[in-house]
Structure formats: C-alpha cells, structure tokens
Image (cartoon, coloured by chain):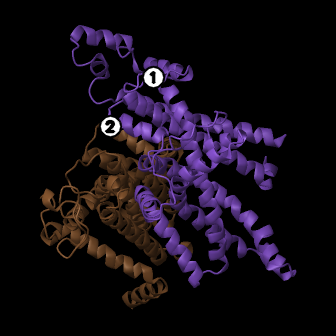
Chain colours: A brown, B purple
Amino acid sequence: MAATSTFTHARYVLGENPLTVVSFGLFFLLVLLAAFGPWIAPYDPLASDTAIKLMAPSAEHWFGTDHLGRDVLSRVIVATRLDLMIALSAVALAFFGGSVLGSLAGYYGGWTDRVIGRVIDTVMAFPLFVLAMGIVAVLGNSVENIVYATAVINLPFYARVARAEIGVRRDSGFAAAAKVAGNGNIGVLARHLYPNILPAMMVQLSLNMGWAILNAAGLSFIGLGVRPPTPEWGIMVAEGAQFIVSGEWWLAVFPGVSLMLAVFCFNMMGDGLRDLIDPRRRT
Amino acid sequence: MAGLATIAKRLLEALPTLFGVILVTFVLTRALPGDPAVYYAGPAADAESIAQVRHAMGLDRSLPVQFASYVKGLAAGDWGVSLSTGRDVTEELGRRLPASLELTLLGLLIAIVVAIPLGVLAATRPNSLVDHICRIIVTTGVSMPVFFTGLLLVYVFYYQLGWAPAPLGRLDFMYIAPDRVTGLYLVDSLIAGDFEVFRASLAHIFLPALTLGIFALAPIARMTRAAMLDVLSSDYIRTARASGLAMRTVLFTYALRNALLSVLTTLGMVFSFLLGANVLVEKVFSWPGIGSFAIDALVASDYAAVQGFVLAMALLFVTLNLTIDLLYAVIDPRIRAAN
C-alpha cells in the first residue's frame, strides 16, 4: 500500500509539472553520453583535417567542423564525460565536507557551531566564482584543482542545509531513544540523525550540480584547468568565441547549448525533487 | 537615535568577516606554488640571493608577525606590484574598477526592472500558463552560462543584425573618453553634456549589461514571486481586499512594498553571482575592467595582481552586503522599532 501511495504521489506531483519528466529524460541521455560517448561519437574527437576546417553543419558533420577540421559533434559528445565528472567530483567532495561540518555544528551547537559558522561565513564573504579563481591560481592550473576549487565554493550550501536539518532533529524523541540505548554522540549522529536529512541533502545536491557545472565551465572558459585539445564544453565555447564575430556560429553554439541543457536539466530535476520531498517549499 | 545605533552595530558585525577575508587572502598569498622567495628571486638566483629575498620579504619571520605586516601593508595601500605591468596593483585595480562597477550596476538595474514585474505577474496567477512561462524564462536564464549568453547576443545583434558595435571595450577609438569624474562613462558623459559619447557608451555597454541582467533575473524573480505569494495570503491583504480597495492598490501599495523587503535580502546572493559572472562577461566583450585584468594576470602567473583582485572583489562584496543590511534596517520600520 505504501509503495502505491508513494507512486501516486509522485505521479501527481510530476503531472503538475511536466518539465520535471523532460528533465529526467535529459538526465538519462547525459548519463548515456557520458558512459558510452567515445563509442557513440561518429569521428575521432581529436583527429584534425585542415582540408575540411570551419565547415558549416552538413549531413556528414551534423554540428560542422572547427578551425582545425575536427568534428564538433564528436567533440561535444565525448566532452560530456569530463564535464559531468568534474562537476560530480566537486559536488561529491562538497557534499561530504559540508555534511560533516554542518552535522557537527548542528549537533553540538555552542563553540563548535560558532567556529564552523564563522569559517562558512568567511567563504561566503567572497564572490564565489572569484574565490574559485583565486584558489586555482594558488594551487596551480590543473583539472584536479578546478575540482577542489569548485568543491570549496559549493561546500557552504551543504553545510547550511545539514546544520539546519540536524539542528531541528537533535532533541527529538528518536535521537534521545538512540542515546539511551547506549549509542555515543557520533553513533547517534551518523546512524540515526544523518539518514533522516539525506532527502533534503539530495535536493540540494541536484540544485547544486547545475551550478557546479557552470562554475567549472566558467573556469575552463577563462583558460584554467582543462587544456586544449581536450574536448570540454567550456573550452570549446572559448575556442569558438573568436569565430562568432565572423559568423561561424556552430563552433561555440553546440557546446554552449549542451552546457545549457545539462544545467537546465539539473535545475529542473532539483525543483522536481524538492516538490516531491518537501511540498511546503513548492515553487 | 536608534538608527545610528543600528548602523554602528552592523558595522561592528562586519569586522570579523573583514578579518576572515583578509586572513584567507593572506593564506592564499603564502600558499604560492613552490617557495615564494624562489619565485620572486627569479630563475637565475642562487641559494644566497634566495635567502636575501626571503629576508627582504619577511618570510623568515613567524606567521603572526608576517600577518601583522601584511595587514599593515594593505592598510597603507601596499598591495604589491603587478609583475606583468610593473605598476602598483592598487593603481591598476583603481583605474579599472569603474568600468566593472558601471557594468555590474547596469546589469543589476536591467535584472531588477524585468524580474520584479515578472515575479509579481507570476505570483498573481500561480500555476497558470503565465506562471509556467515565467518559470521557464527564469530557469533558462540561470541555466545559460554567461559567457555563452554573451556570445549569442554578439552573434545576433552584432553579426546578424548589425545593431550593436563590435564587442571590443567601452568606446570606439574615434570617441574620446569623457573627463573622469566618477569613472562611469554614462554618468561622466552626461556631466560633460556630451550626448554623442553617452549614446556611444550606452551602445557598447548595453549587450554586456544585458548578459549580466539575464543571469541575475532568476534569483530576483523567484524571490519576488515567493515573497508576493507569502504576502498575498496574509491576513492584512485579505482585510485590505475585503475593505473594497482596488486590486491595484492592494497589489502595489500593500503587497509589493512588503515583498520587496525579502527581495532586498537576496540581493547579497545576487551580487555574489554578478561579481563572478562579471569576470566572464568582461572576457567576452573585451571590457577593460578588473575581471579581464585578473584573467590576464592569471594566465601570466602574476600572483600579486590576482590576489589583489580577489581581495578587492571580496572587500567590494562585503561593502555591498553591509550596504544592503543598512538599507534594510533603514527601510523596515519593524527593525528600527526593535532597536
């Protein structure tokens, strides 16, 4: 019975917002491209042939070719994995770090809360993209450091959600019962409180993925992290930028649209998940 | 004088944040890849000259002492020298800051002018077609990478239609920049009474500002909608409507004014987005602001310049947040009364 009602509820909420369904479809497409991109791509994304450079989209090259004669469609497809991997790794790190810091702050309160809160506030006192630029500048220009920088600027959001959600459950009956049953503080926190805040954290995760993709792509657009000739959406838009003013739009537009669709997909999914989990905050 | 007390309290609250920001930039300064002394001594240096540089830079002293002298230097305006231009970082940033500010403020203005009516429209007809369309517009806006939005606008309005000038800076070379009063070309040209330059700089700034505006639409429109929905379901609105006030009066005099207070609090987040997006937009439009300066510095490994930029942006952001807080306290009579 419970399963049926959950399903009915899901269908009701999704029916009210068909865009969520579209976004789930897009998500599966992205995962498919990320997993099997190299086999799906019609050409070698790195093979250049100056004889066919800057060709407009055609039957052979659906998305046209770039200034080195590389197939734009193949590059866009193969780039999916790298773009999603960077964002996913960054978000996973932020999720983990934010969970730990936020949970500790919410559970212990007092000085722990104050110190952690101060650290989070300090991160948030920077315009976040600018802080990411600074971190990459200091750590060195590599893909790995793009991931760390993106993780740092995403961490505060998870920490805040975790702190608030743990805070409201800290004094609840089931937490007290777990304590009486002989669990230590960490045990109560990890096994009894934390699983309850996972839904809220998952919503935050989905809302954040889009933002993480945008930030990582922004960093590679200004020349940080990913180096040519590696196919990556941000750097492909950067390479195509100089050809926009002379009319060769396909170099920048296709990777740009892919980036946009990916972000759009995660934003919509985040909204949909929130509607499913928390009807009060339905937008 | 409750107002003054409120202001003093907010200013004091900003101090720890300021301290944190400076501490972070200090750590970033000291965490240069490799040994900063080796870096600044140059590639031809031997052990002795490296030690000399280390001593000259104060790197052989304890960290708290180094921090104190770092803060003292910052306060005295010593933000280091840009390696690529050979000039003081403060001078470089100061010269370029007005260009960035002008762009960011105009972008914010565009966003506010579009987003607030959109939010109100969506809130008055929740779950209608209008609401869904607003939602799609807004979500698309925030899903577009700013650099991509900028390029699309350039393609359509410069290449295809020819309405906009080439995306190359603030003014064409045939115009002379107006005399500097505020550093904002739009304002300075009006002060000088030179409408031709005003028109030219407006033509140049419009697309980059629009790009920023589209990006900032979403948070403002969403907040307006949520705040309006909240306010519209309150008792005093029901009373106002029951008393027979015109819908327009209820909506704009009663509801919107209260909803705007909540919108004001999200402006901090909006500024965080805008200042970051600004860097990317400046690159697309070759805008001579502090963002494109920082990108050049990043590429050239000009660390003092990058750190100066990060610090300047953070200080700007802290100041903006403080201003928003103060504005909030001034506008909201409840906060004034509470003090």
User: In this rendering, does residue B236 appear at all?
Assistant: yes
Determine whether, in the image, residue B193 is placed left or right of residue B144. right
Could you tell whether B244 is left or right of B141 in the image? Answer: right
In terms of image quadrants, where is residue A71?
bottom left
Where B335 sits versus A118, above or below?
below
Of A255 and A24, nearer the camera is A255
Q: Chain of mark 2?
A: B
Residue type at mark 1 is Arg
Q: Which residue is mark 2?
A: B299
- Secondary structure of the residue carrying numbered label 2: helix
Using a 10 Å C-alpha cutoff, classify the residue at mark 1 as few (fewer than 14 neighbours), some (14 to 19) or many (20 or more).
few
- Callout 1: SS: loop
**Residue nearest the observer in this picture, B182 or B121:** B182
Where residue B218 sits: x, y (%)? 54, 64
Residue A77 occupies which quadrant of the picture? bottom left
The tag earlier along the polypeptide, 1 or 2, is 1
What is the CA distance from the residue labelled 1 to the residue labelled 2? 18 Å
Residue positioned most to the right: B243
In the image, residue B54 above or below residue A272: above
> Which amino acid lies under the numbered mark 2 shown in the image of this protein?
Val
Q: At 45% across and 22% down in the image, what residue appears?
A: B87
* Quarter of the N terminus of chain B within the rendering: top right
Q: Residue at x 39, y 87 (%)?
A: A7
- The x and y percentages for residue B227 are 65, 67
The chain letter for the residue carrying disc 1 is: B
Q: Which residue is mark 1?
A: B87
Can residue B27 be seen in this snapshot?
A: no
Whether discs 1 and 2 lie on one chain: the answer is: yes
Residue nearest the observer in this picture, B3 or B37: B37
Report the residue at 37% width, 24% height from top.
Answer: B83
On the image, the x and y values in percent for residue B81 come to 43, 22
